[in-house]
Image: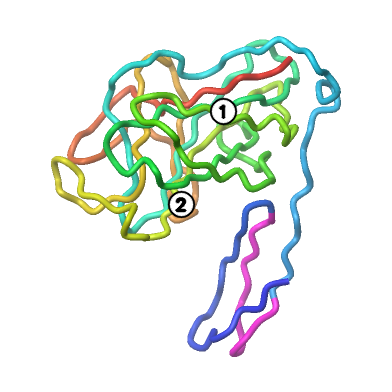
Amino acid sequence: MRLIHYLSGIDSLSFELPGYYRRNIDTGGDSLLIPLIKRKSIASDAVSNKRDCRLTLIGATKELLNPSLGCFENSVYEVALLMQNKKRKIGRLKNVSYFIAKNGVNSAPFWIRIYKNDNGKPGEELSVENLIVTPIKSNSYNRYDISRHEIVFPENGCFVSMQWLNTRDIKYLYKTNRTNDEAFGQNLVLTDELENALCYQRENKYSWTRIEKFQWDGITLNKYAPMISIEVCY
């Protein structure tokens, strides 16, 4: 349960915490009790008991100094990339990697989120625990071992996203190079190595929209995808 005070003048409230389902509540008083329902872990019985397995790298693999993408100061931004399962068999996610750029504020935490592939669009969330991490290096891949969460890699693949945790803490704010806009946190490098990459984005947790081109810091980038990769245990 969470007790929210001082709701006068607010018609509705959307409440979400890592590991819990989102609740949309109509308010009607000065305080409100919100019951939070914990998500059930989604694991693969077919691979969860294997100690030794063959790891397969999927997604971005090249270390290219390409343009990068960030988050504006007044936004909660999330970008997701489809990881295709060419083996067409169930696996388990071992590692997730993000290529973090040199520019931006690299010490800001971000949220790893993983979703089912719902007919080519992010669907139900597979990552149910608190997968909030902090980069330790820039101009490089940052790899995170998520194997203890026993997250299934479905036969039709999954979407892996990066969500900027925009706390508006001034120590994570900076000015972009070209447009001098206020921005938050780290920048994620983009790559053109992935043919027919399927990418989606959303801001402030609204509906997903497919990315045909990236626009950041006054530049329009076609045929790019975020540099995200996974290692899958089969």
Looking at the image, which residue sits at the far front?
Answer: 136
* CB contact under 8 Å: marks 1 and 2: no
Name the image quarter holding residue 132.
top right
Could you tell me which secondary element the residue under label 1 belongs to? strand
225 versus 6 height, above or below? above
Q: Which residue is mark 2?
A: 165
At x 53%, y 80%, the residue is: 11
Q: Position of residue 80 (x, y in %)?
A: 49, 35
Q: Position of residue 138 (x, y in %)?
A: 36, 30
In the depicted view, which residue is nearer to us: 21 or 95? 95
In the depicted view, which residue is nearer to us: 101 or 189? 101
At x 48%, y 45%, the residue is: 110
Q: Is residue 127 left or right of residue 11?
A: right
From mark 1 to mark 2, how far is it between C-alphas?
18 Å
Location of the N terminus (image quadrant):
bottom right
Magenta highlight range = 20-33
Q: Is residue 187 left or right of residue 228?
A: left
Q: Which residue is mark 1?
A: 96
